């Protein structure tokens, strides 16, 4: 889930499914890198997730599922320090 300082929320989902085959005892590491949304729109890519097991890896984009509403003018006026 992603939420904004002004209280809007949406889910984060994988853009596509991935498979990574490993031996049962091979450790799998996960790296998730995200960035702030530009348009707050359904389907906007806001990051990438990568799974690594030994020399193999798989990755997928992470996107917004749902609509993140932009801050209202009133919220912007009363919270100027919280906007980037």
Image (tube, rainbow, N blue to C red):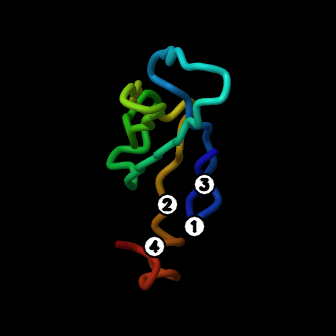
Compared with residue 43, is residue 2 higher up or lower down, i.e. above or below? below
Residue drawn at x 47%, y 53% as measured from the top left: 70
Q: Position of residue 34 (x, y in %)?
A: 42, 50
Residue drawn at x 38%, y 34% as measured from the top left: 44
Instruction: Give the spatial CA distance, label 2 vs label 4.
Output: 6 Å
Q: Earlier in the sequence, mark 2 or mark 4?
A: 2
Q: Earlier in the sequence, mark 4 or mark 3?
A: 3
Q: What residue does disc 1 label?
A: 5
Helix, strand or loop status at disc 4: helix
Q: Nearer the viewer, residue 70 or 58?
A: 58
Q: Nearer the viewer, residue 67 or 21?
A: 21
The answer to whether marks 2 and 4 mark residues whose Cβ atoms lie closer than 8 Å is yes
Q: Nearer the viewer, residue 10 or 57?
A: 57
The answer to whether marks 4 and 1 mark residues whose Cβ atoms lie closer than 8 Å is no
Q: What residue does disc 3 label?
A: 3
Question: How many dots with numbers?
Answer: 4
The answer to whether marks 2 and 3 mark residues whose Cβ atoms lie closer than 8 Å is no
Quadrant housing the C terminus: bottom left
Badge 1, how many Cα within 10 Å: few under 14, some, many 20+?
few
The image's mark for residue 71 is 2
The image's mark for residue 76 is 4
Badge 2, how many Cα within 10 Å: few under 14, some, many 20+?
some
Helix, strand or loop status at disc 1: loop
- Which label sits in the foreground, 2 or 1? 1
Quadrant housing the N terminus: top right
Compared across the picture, whether 23 is left or right of 46 comes to right
Q: Earlier in the sequence, mark 4 or mark 1?
A: 1
Q: Position of residue 28 (x, y in %)?
A: 56, 36
Instruction: Give the spatial CA distance, label 4 vs label 1.
Output: 11 Å
Residue drawn at x 48%, y 16% as measured from the top left: 18
Compared with residue 24, is residue 54 higher up or lower down, i.e. above or below? below
């Amino acid at each position: 889930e992603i939420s904004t300082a002004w209280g809007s929320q949406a889910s984060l989902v994988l853009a596509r499914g991935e498979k990574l085959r490993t031996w049962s005892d091979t450790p799998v590491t996960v790296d998730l890198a995200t960035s702030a949304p530009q348009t707050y729109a359904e389907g906007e890519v806001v990051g990438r997730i990568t799974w690594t097991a030994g020399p193999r890896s798989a990755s997928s984009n992470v996107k917004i599922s749902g609509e993140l509403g932009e801050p209202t003018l009133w919220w912007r006026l009363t919270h100027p320090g919280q906007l980037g």
